[in-house]
Amino acid sequence: MGIAEVLTIVLVLLKLTDVITWSWWLVLLPAILSFGLYVLIVVVKLIMVMVAVFVVKKRDSMR
């Protein structure tokens, strides 16, 4: 478990026990941000693979 998951669990427990009165958006923000970062990394990797495949195909077609 990473720090975002631990922080989310702690904040959810604090919210459910009424220790904090934050909105659920703030409580779940660490999980939302870590998921968004994960999605961004996957998209960038897919774009890099697509560019590499395009370059290799273009190079092979020029031979």
Image (cartoon, rainbow, N blue to C red):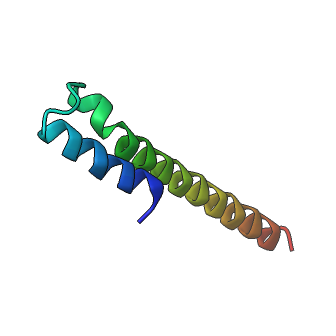
Residue in view at x 66 percent, y 58 percent: 48
Residue in view at x 75 percent, y 69 percent: 56
In this rendered view, identify the residue nearer to me: 55 or 14. Answer: 14
Looking at the rendering, in which quadrant would you find the C terminus?
bottom right
Residue in view at x 19 percent, y 36 percent: 15
**Among all residues in the image, which is located at the extreme front?**
19
- Against 60, residue 37 (above or below) is above
**Among all residues in the image, which is located at the extreme right?**
63
In this rendered view, identify the residue nearer to me: 59 or 17. Answer: 17
- Against 2, residue 27 (above or below) is above
**Among all residues in the image, which is located at the extreme left?**
17
- Against 17, residue 52 (above or below) is below
Residue in view at x 31 percent, y 30 percent: 26
Measured as percent of width and height from the top left, residue 24 is found at: 22, 31
Q: Left or right: 15 with respect to 30?
A: left
In this rendered view, identify the residue nearer to me: 33 or 42. Answer: 33
The quarter of the picture where residue 54 lies is: bottom right
Measured as percent of width and height from the top left, residue 62 is found at: 84, 68
Measured as percent of width and height from the top left, residue 23 is found at: 22, 25
Looking at the rendering, in which quadrant would you find the N terminus?
bottom left
The quarter of the picture where residue 50 lies is: bottom right
Measured as percent of width and height from the top left, residue 12 is found at: 22, 44
